[in-house]
Amino acid sequence: MQFAGSRVRRYAVGTLGILAVLVFLVAFFPWNWLRGPIASIASTRLQRTVAIGHIDVDWGLPTLVAVDDLTIGNAEWSKTPLMATFPRTVFTFSIPSLLRMTPDIVQLTRPDVLLERNAAGDANWHFDDAAGHTGAAFGAIDVDACVSSSNARACRASPVSMAVASSKAR
């Protein structure tokens, strides 16, 4: 004779066991395995070569995703092969933004970005893919910038404020 309570207990223990395994897998997942697939998706979306050096995820409130040595290739018409290099990029997610996959804050450390136009007036910062996806959504960008001149290069941790706007030529 079986008791109804033992069946419920088995299902509860089984469900908790599965949840514990999932939490363990997510917490200790080797995120660098996803560098290739993420770079491939980004390359397709941007129609540029994207490379990622290292990914580290810090689960918490907020969740931080750190990407080291991120590079984005330039437009085909440019003489310079790389449009942007980011030695370190940190994406900050709250729980709602994590579910939407749109970071609240993107922190760039010492970015090196080349913005240029060709003779026809095409800008290398226009990223439109074949599916019609344009732009990216995020809350804010923090830049830890290095200011360079022809004589010296000095890094500073003061905030840089900027507004970036782009419109697609029709």
Image (tube, rainbow, N blue to C red):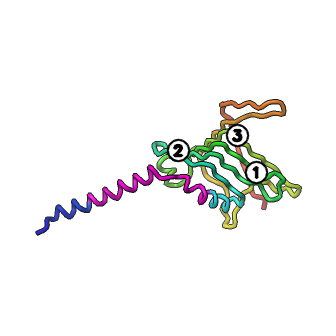
SS type, badge 2: strand
* Place of residue 43 in the rendered image (x, y in percent of width and height, measured from the top left): 67, 59
Q: Residue at x 26, y 59 (%)?
A: 12
Please state which amino acid type lies under the numbered disc 1: Leu
Looking at the image, residue 3 sits to the left or right of residue 76; the answer is: left
* Place of residue 65 in the rendered image (x, y in percent of width and height, measured from the top left): 55, 46
Q: Upstream in the sequence, badge 1 or badge 2?
A: 2
Q: Upstream in the sequence, badge 2 or badge 3?
A: 2
Looking at the image, residue 105 sits to the left or right of residue 11; the answer is: right
Let me know if residue 34 is in the magenta part: yes
- Which mark is drawn over residue 64? 2
Q: Residue at x 69, y 63 (%)?
A: 129
User: How far apart are labels 1 and 2 at the CA level?
Assistant: 26 Å
Front: mark 2 or 3: 2
- In the rendered image, the residue lying farthest to the bottom is 1
Magenta residues, start to end: 12-38
* Place of residue 50 in the rendered image (x, y in percent of width and height, measured from the top left): 68, 55
Please state which amino acid type lies under the numbered disc 3: Met
- Which mark is drawn over residue 82? 1
Q: Residues within 10 Å of mark 1 (few under 14, many from 20)?
A: some
Q: Upstream in the sequence, badge 3 or badge 1?
A: 1
Please state which amino acid type lies under the numbered disc 2: Leu
Looking at the image, residue 163 sits to the left or right of residue 28; the answer is: right
Q: Report if the CB atoms under discs 2 and 3 are less than 8 Å apart.
A: no
